[in-house]
Amino acid sequence: MAQLTAEEIGKRTKKEKRAATWKAVKQNKACYAMIASFMIFFIIFTVIPVVMSLPMGFTDFNLAQTPKFVGLSNYTALFLSDKVFIQSIRVTLIFALFTGPVSYVMCFLLAWLINSLPPKLKTIFTLIFYIPSMASVYTVWQLIFSGDINGYLNSFLVNLGVLNAPVQWLTDSRYVLGVCIIVQLWISLGAGFLALRAGFQNIDKSLYEAGAIEGIRTKWQELIYIVIPSMKPQLLFAAVMQIVGSFTAGTAAQNLVGFPSTDYKAHTIMTHAYDYGWVRFEMGYASAICMILFLAMFICNKVISKVLGNNDD
Amino acid sequence: MKVGESMKNTDKLKGTSRQAGRKYGGTVAVFVLLFITGLFMLLPIYLTVVMSLKPVEELFVFPPKLYTLRPTLDNFRDMFDVLKSNRVPFSRYVFNSLFVTVTVTVLQSFFASMAAFVLAKCKFPGSKLINSVIVVALLYQSNVIYIMQYMVMSEMGIIDTPLALIFPAVASPMGLFLMRQSISQIPDSMIEAAKVDGAGLFRICWQIVMPNQKPALMTLIIFAFQGAWNIQGGSVIFQEQYKTLPTVVTQAASSGLARAGVAMAAAVFMLIPPVIVFVLAQRQVIETMAHSGIKD
């Protein structure tokens, strides 16, 4: 019914429009009542802080004094004189391009493969692939990649005869980024993966039967014609999660290869924002950095939504 | 496949049994593939558990071993000893954590599912705006937000109370987004039919939609529990009596005993509850399918 009023609105004058909207609002009282509980908390603890933080990028804010308006100078400084920021853009792009798509495809394929297992094994394998994102254990990766001969990887490779001397995985600028990407991939089978698993459980089994009658023979055809079309909402959810996860990566790298990393090889935009925000307390500058990151993610999300054929957003 | 088809034509029975064999073979292949990938995923977790059980003298043995000769609970004991030496009894932290986790999980799941249903299935003035704001909120990550959140909470006077841990976690845009995506797959006709029968939105949501959404709902609960269990109230809670487990366990692992084994013990200890919840919830997801009479 609300749709109907929306169509009518176009033909009417402003005053009538407002009256119609008001009528629609009243008609949908139940809807507002049901989102109220969520919206109250969402507005107070997310929307208001976000809106308050938006103008901070245009200020000089050190947490102690009131923010001072400085115009665009944070942004010009970022692009014109901050060499580390330019490096962090490069690192973030490499990170995002490697971990984002790879882990997205992995999430989907693993969820799909798990789906063909018997129920007990489903739970076990879902747990195995999801557990890294539950446990934030960077310490163990430090032991695996440890630079001395006591590191698991070094001792393994030396014993095997592949290496003559231990490699400084965590400090050698040639390996730092690669190591961080591996660890990031390891923890990246998170929310998106689990949402896709849930999506597979929800596919109506009669669709497969109908497909078999229509002449779908191979698993591959089933994937293209049945599975992917009926998983679109979950695929979009997983895409958004992957965008956020891969663009804002940094914590794992910071914990693993130290901060700052050798030659800033694993210095992501998020690490840069952390540096200015919590180390130097230049919050204005840090929030300008975050704003640029947000714009990048926003554009990326728009593109992916288009590709996945979602026109709502 | 071709062989299977021709077999079906000549000898139907034999053909189907051959197909079944192939299906079984496929499952085994999938299992082997997943098993190998799974080993890589599990190795660091396995090492964490082994390290947490290693006695001190085994920690720096060369070459490093993938197992322990004398498993011991010393690391766990040491961690608890540090926790016990605090002014507040250990059980208090456990209670705080459980209280915060359960409250957040229940409220978050309840609020997000209800809002997601309305946003997915009803069109009303503002619904489009809210839908896109949710996605924007997911994408907007800034460390300034926490400062603003702090200011809002101090304005409300809830800093240094358990509410400062609970309130910001109650409305989860991610949870809502997950549920909205999943509910959008339910055919409109189902909801229209219920409306014709005179059911209100609240009843439609909880008696018709949600029973169909068990996989997504259980996933939401896993996310909510995991997030809430790991809430670190370091910057909003200062009184010892309101601190939660993650805060004090990290403190115990990093200060006092800066020993790899204890850090691993802390990680293993903190991992147990989310894993239990995960397994219980995932079982539900799979059982639903079995009960609805649809064979795999």
Image (cartoon, grey):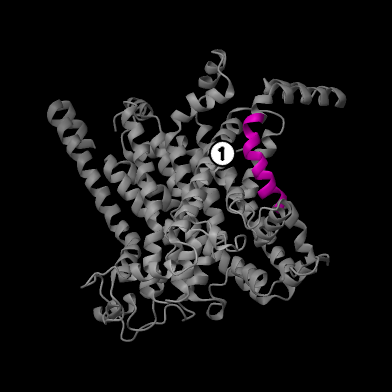
Q: On the picture, is A265 further left or further right than A103?
A: right
Give the magenta range. A33-49
Q: Nearer the viewer, residue A87 or B46?
A: B46
> Residue A239: percent from the left, percent from the top?
52, 48
Residue sitting at x 38%, y 74% = B260
Q: Is residue A39 magenta?
A: yes
Residue sitting at x 69%, y 38% = B129
The residue identified by callout 1 is: B112
Q: Quadrant of residue A259?
A: bottom right
Residue sitting at x 46%, y 38% = B216
> Residue B182: percent from the left, percent from the top?
50, 36
SS at circle 1: helix
Q: Is residue A210 magenta?
A: no
Question: In the picture, which quadrant includes the C terminus of chain A?
Answer: top right
Compared to A222, does B44 lie above or below? below
Q: Is residue B150 visible?
A: yes
> Residue B33: percent from the left, percent from the top?
28, 53
The secondary structure making up most of the magenta span is: helix
Compared to A300, does A253 lie above or below? below
> Residue A171: percent from the left, percent from the top?
47, 81
Residue sitting at x 65%, y 48% = B136
Q: Quadrant of residue B201?
A: top right
